[in-house]
């Protein structure tokens, strides 16, 4: 599937040139001629925004700031005639991922687009997984892989493992684990936690030592055991 790019620039000829050339590179391109229009057109499916800084109405900087404040992490490359160091620092400070000064070459734009998309994809994939030696925890697929083999966990087992692994070296009491893994289930006893931990350790095989018990306190994910 083609990656979607939104071009935001109030100069229609620039939009058309960029759209034509990026489409030739295999991207699915749409244009917005103001920041306000971009707010209406931008969707979670867009992989990147090419954003002019100086536009009538809301500026590109303000749009980027608004998107980041709303939690949208779509990569942004600023396109602008303002090329001073302060302008670049402003662009990065409001959430920009790259900054291209006008006039620019199409080859430069396409190269920067590819680089930012590659970097963002690598960062996203890394944040979706936790890796400890030959143990991998995929937070999106809700599965673990040991030595290249997928291991089936129940929903509760996976949530316990993820809680401990994401907070390695922190000790969680049995009550902490109950509140996290059984937040909607009343009458869960501390013994239930111990049973699930035992089952989880068994499934982890040689990595069972990663889940360590601190007598009188609780459990932790001990990476020092590797």
Image (tube, grey):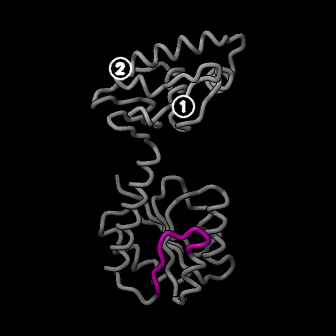
Give the residue displayed 63% in from the left and 70% down from the top.
Answer: 63
List x then y, in percent, for residue 185.
68, 16
Determine whether 101 is above or below 205 in the image: below
Q: Is residue 152 above or below residue 92?
A: above
Residue 182, compared with residue 18, is above or below; it is above
From which residue to which does the magenta span run? 92-101
Camera-side residue: 69 or 172?
172
Spatial separation of the CA atoms under disc 1 and disc 2 = 17 Å
- Mark 1 and mark 2 lie on one chain; the one further toward the N terminus is 1
Q: Residue at x 62, y 82 (%)?
A: 55
Q: Secondary structure at mark 1?
A: helix
Q: Quadrant of residue 18?
A: bottom left
Q: Nearer the viewer, residue 135 or 211?
A: 211
Question: Which residue has dot 1 on it?
Answer: 164
At a point 71% along the width and 10% down the height, the residue shown is 187
Residue 35 rendering spot, x and y as whole percentages: 62, 72
On whether residue 100 falls in the magenta region, the answer is yes
Give coordinates of residue 220: x percent, y percent.
55, 29
**At which x and y percent is residue 192?**
60, 11
Looking at the rendered image, the quarter that the C terminus falls into is top left
Q: Is residue 174 magenta?
A: no
Q: Residues within 10 Å of mark 2 (few under 14, many from 20)?
A: few
Q: Is residue 29 left or right of residue 180?
A: left
- Residue 97's tag is none
Q: Is residue 183 left or right of residue 96?
A: right
* Residue count near mark 1 (Cα–Cα under 10 Å), binned few <14, some 14–19, many ≥20: many
Residue drawn at (39%, 58%), measured in percent from left and top? 3
Q: Which residue is mark 2?
A: 205
Outermost residue, left direction?
Answer: 148
Question: Is label 2 in a helix, a strand or a loop?
Answer: helix
Identify the residue at the far right of this view: 186
């Amino acid at each position: 599937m083609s990656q979607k790019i939104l071009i935001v620039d109030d100069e229609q000829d620039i939009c058309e040139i960029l759209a034509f050339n990026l489409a030739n590179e295999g991207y699915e391109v749409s244009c917005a001629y103001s920041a306000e229009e971009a707010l209406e057109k931008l969707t979670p499916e867009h992989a990147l925004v090419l954003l002019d800084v100086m536009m009538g109405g809301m500026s590109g900087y303000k749009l980027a700031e608004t998107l980041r404040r709303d939690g949208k992490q779509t990569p942004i490359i600023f396109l602008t005639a303002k090329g001073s160091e302060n302008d670049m620092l402003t662009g990065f400070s409001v959430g920009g991922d790259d900054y291209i000064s006008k006039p620019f070459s199409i080859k430069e734009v396409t190269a920067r687009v590819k680089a930012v998309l590659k970097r963002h994809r690598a960062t996203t994939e890394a944040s979706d997984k936790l890796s400890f030696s030959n143990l991998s925890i995929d937070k999106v697929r809700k599965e673990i892989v040991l030595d290249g083999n997928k291991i089936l966990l129940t929903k509760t087992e996976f949530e316990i493992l993820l809680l401990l692994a994401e907070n390695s070296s922190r000790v969680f009491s049995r009550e902490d684990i109950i509140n996290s893994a059984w937040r909607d289930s009343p009458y869960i006893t501390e013994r239930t936690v111990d049973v699930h931990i035992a089952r989880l350790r068994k499934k982890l095989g040689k990595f069972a030592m990663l889940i360590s018990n601190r007598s009188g306190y609780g459990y932790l994910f001990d990476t020092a055991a590797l």
